[in-house]
Image: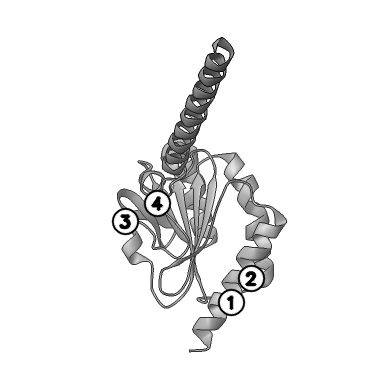
Amino acid sequence: MLFLAKIKSIHYTTGEQHMLRFKKYLISLALFGSINGYALELGGSLADISIPTKGELILNKTKVDYKAWSTSTISRGTPALIFHLAARMSSDKIIDPLRTRLEQENFTPGSFQSISVVNIDDAMWGTAGLVSSEMEKNKRAHPEAIMVADDASRGLKAWELQKGTVAVILLDASGKIRYLKEGKLHSSDIDTILSLLKTEIALVASK
C-alpha cells in the first residue's frame, strides 16, 4: 500500500509539473508575440508620422531650408524606397552597399521615390549639429533626393524600429509594404530589394 501510495504521489506531481510547464509555455508565447509585434508588416500600410520641426530639407539656391514633413506627402502611383537611419556612422556603413547598387542600376529619374528619414535624435552625444551639416551638404549634392531630419524619434516610435541602426522599407505604388528589413544588409537582401523594386516599377510602367 505504501508503494502504491508513493506511485500515485509521483504521478500526481509529474502531472502538475507538466501542467505548470504548459502554462509557462503559453505565457512565453504570449510574451514573445507581444515583444515581437511590429507596427509595420508586409502587405500593411506605413504608420503615419508627422515631423513639424526640422523635417524635409529644401534647397533654395545654395541655402538649405526646412519644412514640416509627413508620410502623407509620399506620392501614390510610384514605388517608394524609404531609408530610416540612426544618425551614426554605422548607418552609412550598412546602407552604402545598397546605395552603390542603386546608382549602378541607373534607374530612370522619377521611376521611384527615394526617401531618407534620418533620426538626429539618435545621434552620438554632441554630434547632432555635425549630422545636420552633413545632411545639408548631401542635399546640395543630390537635390532630387528627399531627405528628412527627425529630431524627436517620431519615425522610430511610430514604426517601432530598433535604435542605432537602419531600416529599409519598400512601398508599392498603392502604399503597401512590399519589403521591410532592419539592421545589417547582406548581399542577398540587396538583391531582393532591387528585384522587388524593379518589379514594382515595371508594374507601374505596364499600366
Quarter of the picture containing the N terminus is top right
Q: For the residues marked 1 and 2, what is the alpha-carbon distance in whole angstroms? A: 6 Å
Q: Residues within 10 Å of mark 3 (few under 14, many from 20)?
A: some
Q: Residues within 10 Å of mark 1 (few under 14, many from 20)?
A: some
Q: Which mark is residue 39?
A: 4
Per the image, the residue denoted by label 3 is 67
Per the image, label 1 sits on a secondary structure element best described as helix
Q: Are marks 4 and 2 in contact (CB under 8 Å)?
A: no
Q: For the residues marked 4 and 2, what is the alpha-carbon distance in whole angstroms? A: 25 Å
Q: Is residue 127 visible?
A: no
Q: Residues within 10 Å of mark 4 (few under 14, many from 20)?
A: some
Per the image, the residue denoted by label 2 is 195
Q: Tag 3: residue type?
A: Lys
Q: Is residue 176 visible?
A: yes
Q: Tag 4: residue type?
A: Ala
Q: For the residues marked 4 and 3, what is the alpha-carbon distance in whole angstroms? A: 26 Å
Q: For the residues marked 3 and 2, what is the alpha-carbon distance in whole angstroms? A: 33 Å
The residue at the point 39 percent across, 74 percent down is: 76
The residue at the point 32 percent across, 58 percent down is: 70
* Mark 4 or 1, closer to the camera: 4
Q: Are marks 1 and 2 in contact (CB under 8 Å)?
A: yes
